[in-house]
Image (cartoon, rainbow, N blue to C red):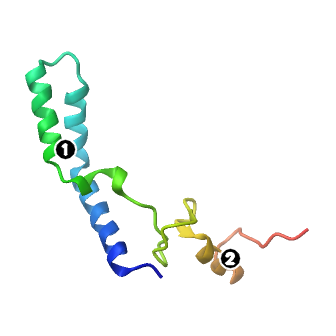
Amino acid sequence: MAKKSAIERNKKRERLTKSAANRRAKLKETLHNRELPPEERFKAAMDLNKIAKNASPVRLHNRCELTGRPKAFYRKFRISRIALRELASHGQIPGVVKSSW
């Protein structure tokens, strides 16, 4: 089980990312628009820097929904390999069967 603080920190980052997504997208669009005057683009860059660092989607880390484990994460199931194996062994994931040959 991962540290509770790390899990909560990541949840906080997810909330911040969602709340600042529209504002960040508008500022980036303004920043990359070459037709605007340099002063306006510079102001957009300054405003973009004022947004919290934790609101950046790059700072998010994929974690297992069940255990919070940050490594060996399967995106398709949103859980770690260990949790996937446990659930698959108990038959709780439809369509997943243990391989044998």
Kind of residue indicated by mark 2: Ala
Q: How many numbered tags mark residues here?
A: 2
For the residues marked 1 and 2, what is the alpha-carbon distance in whole angstroms? 41 Å
Q: Position of residue 15 (x, y in %)?
A: 27, 62
The residue depicted at 44 percent of the width and 78 percent of the height is: 2
CB atoms at circles 1 and 2 under 8 Å apart?
no
Q: Which mark is residue 72?
A: none
User: 45 left or right of 55?
Assistant: left
The secondary element bearing badge 2 is classed as: helix
Which of the 4 quarters of the picture holds residue 93?
Answer: bottom right
**Residue located beneath label 2 in the image:** 88
User: 56 left or right of 37?
Assistant: right
**Residue located beneath label 1 in the image:** 23
- Density class for disc 2 (Cα within 10 Å; few <14, some 14-19, many ≥20) is some
The residue depicted at 30 percent of the width and 70 percent of the height is: 9
Q: Position of residue 37 (x, y in %)?
A: 11, 18
Kind of residue indicated by mark 1: Arg
Q: Position of residue 98 (x, y in %)?
A: 78, 73
Which residue is situated farthest in the right direction here? 101
The secondary element bearing badge 1 is classed as: helix
Q: Is residue 69 above or below residue 34?
A: below
The residue depicted at 17 percent of the width and 49 percent of the height is: 51
Q: Is residue 5 above or below residue 36?
A: below
- Going from N to C along the chain, the mark reached first, 1 or 2, is 1
Which of the 4 quarters of the picture holds residue 39?
Answer: top left
